[in-house]
Image (cartoon, helix red, strand yellow):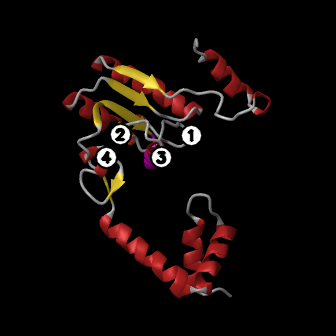
């Protein structure tokens, strides 16, 4: 029999994204093989994150200061606001030095199946933010899924009254992608979004 405490650990690990009961057991066993080497630093990191990391009250990013480092950066372009679904999207965009504007995290995308309605997303805070600090461009950096594109269309209706340019990320053939390996949807989007050279 597995001890109750270990069962709780396995259960909690198994509830993490990308994990399940089997992965939870595997990780728990790995942690328990060398608890001082693996588990203690992990618990300390979790305690520190719980104590110090918070959601930015301006954009929704995660940071140890209010407002977050990006919102507080005077070198950022305040005329351009990039709307993303999750904090992970900010981290992905920040890996490239191309975008130097500010961000707004919605906290998800519209999805009737998942019960994600407009009132459950940070849409009202986005609109309030645009009332207070008008921008020249809003970039809707949302996924090319049905839910992501539904959210784009919903936001476009609400952003029209602000008179700013609204853009989305380009979709299509990835760098290094071979046409033979692409699905029909990606090829279709790439052809529709083609540009003159």
The residue beneath circle 4 is: 70
> What residue do we see at 70% from left, 34% from top?
177
- Marks 3 and 4: CB-CB under 8 Å? no
Residue 18 location in percent, x, y? 62, 58
Q: Which residue is mark 2?
A: 104
On the image, the x and y values in percent for residue 87 come to 43, 48
The residue range painted magenta reads 85-91
Q: Disc 1 or 4, which lies upstream in sequence? A: 4
Mark 3 and mark 1 lie on one chain; the one further toward the N terminus is 3
Q: Is residue 106 left or right of residue 36?
A: left
Q: Nearer the viewer, mark 4 or mark 2?
A: 4
Helix, strand or loop for disc 3: loop
Residue depicted at 54% across the width and 26% down the height? 170
C-alpha separation, residue under disc 3 versus residue under disc 1: 32 Å
Q: Nearer the viewer, residue 156 or 93?
A: 93
- Residue beneath disc 1: 113
Residue 4 lies in magenta, yes or no? no
The circle drawn on residue 95 is 3
* Residue at 36% from the left image edge and 72% from the top image edge: 48
What's the CA distance linking mark 3 and mark 4? 13 Å
Q: Marks 1 and 4, Cα distance to the nearest angstrom?
A: 33 Å
């Amino acid at each position: 029999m597995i001890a109750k405490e270990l069962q709780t650990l396995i259960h909690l690990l198994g509830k993490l994204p990308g994990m399940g009961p089997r992965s939870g057991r595997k990780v728990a066993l790995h942690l328990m093989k060398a608890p001082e080497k693996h588990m203690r630093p992990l618990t300390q990191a979790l305690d520190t994150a719980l104590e110090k990391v918070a959601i930015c009250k301006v954009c929704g990013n995660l940071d140890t200061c209010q407002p977050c480092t990006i919102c507080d950066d005077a070198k950022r372009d305040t005329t351009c606001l990039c709307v993303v679904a999750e904090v992970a999207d900010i981290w992905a965009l920040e890996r490239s030095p191309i975008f130097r504007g500010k961000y707004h995290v919605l906290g998800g995308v519209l999805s009737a199946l998942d019960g994600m309605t407009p009132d459950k997303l940070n849409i009202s805070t986005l609109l309030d933010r645009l009332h207070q600090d008008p921008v020249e461009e809003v970039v809707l950096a949302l996924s090319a899924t049905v839910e992501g594109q539904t959210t784009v269309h919903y936001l476009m209706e609400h952003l029209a009254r602000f008179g700013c340019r609204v853009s989305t990320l380009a979709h299509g053939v990835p760098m290094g992608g071979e046409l033979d390996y692409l699905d029909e949807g990606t090829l279709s989007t790439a052809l529709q979004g083609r540009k003159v050279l």
